[in-house]
Amino acid sequence: MSQNLYAQFSGTPMSQGDIDRLLKEQGYGILSLCDDGTPYSVPLSFGYDGESVSLLFLSEGPQSTKAEAISEGAIARLLVTDIRGRFSWQSVAVTGPVHAVAPDGEAFEQFIATLDDNAWFIRGFERADSLDSIQGWRLDPEEIRGLERTEQPVE
């Protein structure tokens, strides 16, 4: 039995292996940013290569809220969850600075390859003429925390 009396509700820390597995398998999450003191969260597709997180923004142009909320070096948090039931879930939060990925060159090709490996991403987006803008961002983790609840509740 866990020393934490509330573990059946709050979860227990995940192993690094389980955190990596969830980040590689889930492929989507909620990215939270702060724009001049106003919180902003957006669901998005991401890829994880074991070191950094590749974030795919499909924006409606330079005036999109996403484009206005994100900036070079800003601190962001990505929340990734897998919820199967009240007492069966996993949650990982990745926090760190974001950096733009230039849309040309080797870094962008690696960005696309990472998305192609494990994001909810269709490679066709990369070259689609109908999209005004595809923005690539890299989240460099300074902190990764994971909690899970996989056991039945104590009765």
Image (cartoon, grey):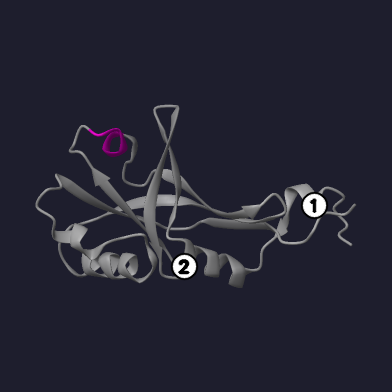
Furthest toward the left, the residue is 129
User: With 5 as the anchor, is 61 left or right in this view?
Assistant: left
Residue depicted at 85% across the width and 53% down the height: 4
SS assignment at label 1: helix
Tag of residue 40 = none
The region drawn magenta spans 64-68
Tell me the kind of residue under disc 2.
Answer: Lys
Amino acid, disc 1: Gln
Q: Where residue 87 appears, x then y in whole percent?
A: 72, 53
Disc 2 and disc 1 in contact, CB within 8 angstroms: no
The residue at the point 26 percent across, 62 percent down is: 122
Left or right, 155 with respect to 65, comes to right
Kindly identify the residue that appears in the image at 58 percent across and 65 percent down.
Answer: 19
Dividing the image into 4 quarters, which one contains the N terminus? bottom right
Magenta stretch mostly in which secondary structure?
helix
Name the quadrant containing residue 36: top left
Q: Position of residue 139 (x, y in %)?
A: 40, 55
Query: What is the CA distance from the residue labelled 2 to the residue labelled 1?
Result: 26 Å
Residue 84 among magenta residues: no
Judge by depth and name the residue closer to the eye, 139 or 32: 32
The number of numbered discs placed on residues in the rendered structure image is 2
What percent of the width, then of the height, locates residue 28? 43, 55
Label 1 neighbour load within 10 Å: few <14, some 14-19, many 20+: some
Label drawn at residue 24: 2
- The residue shown at (90%, 52%) is 155
Camera-nearest residue between 131 and 15: 131
- Residue marked by disc 1: 8
Q: Secondary structure beneath disc 2?
A: helix
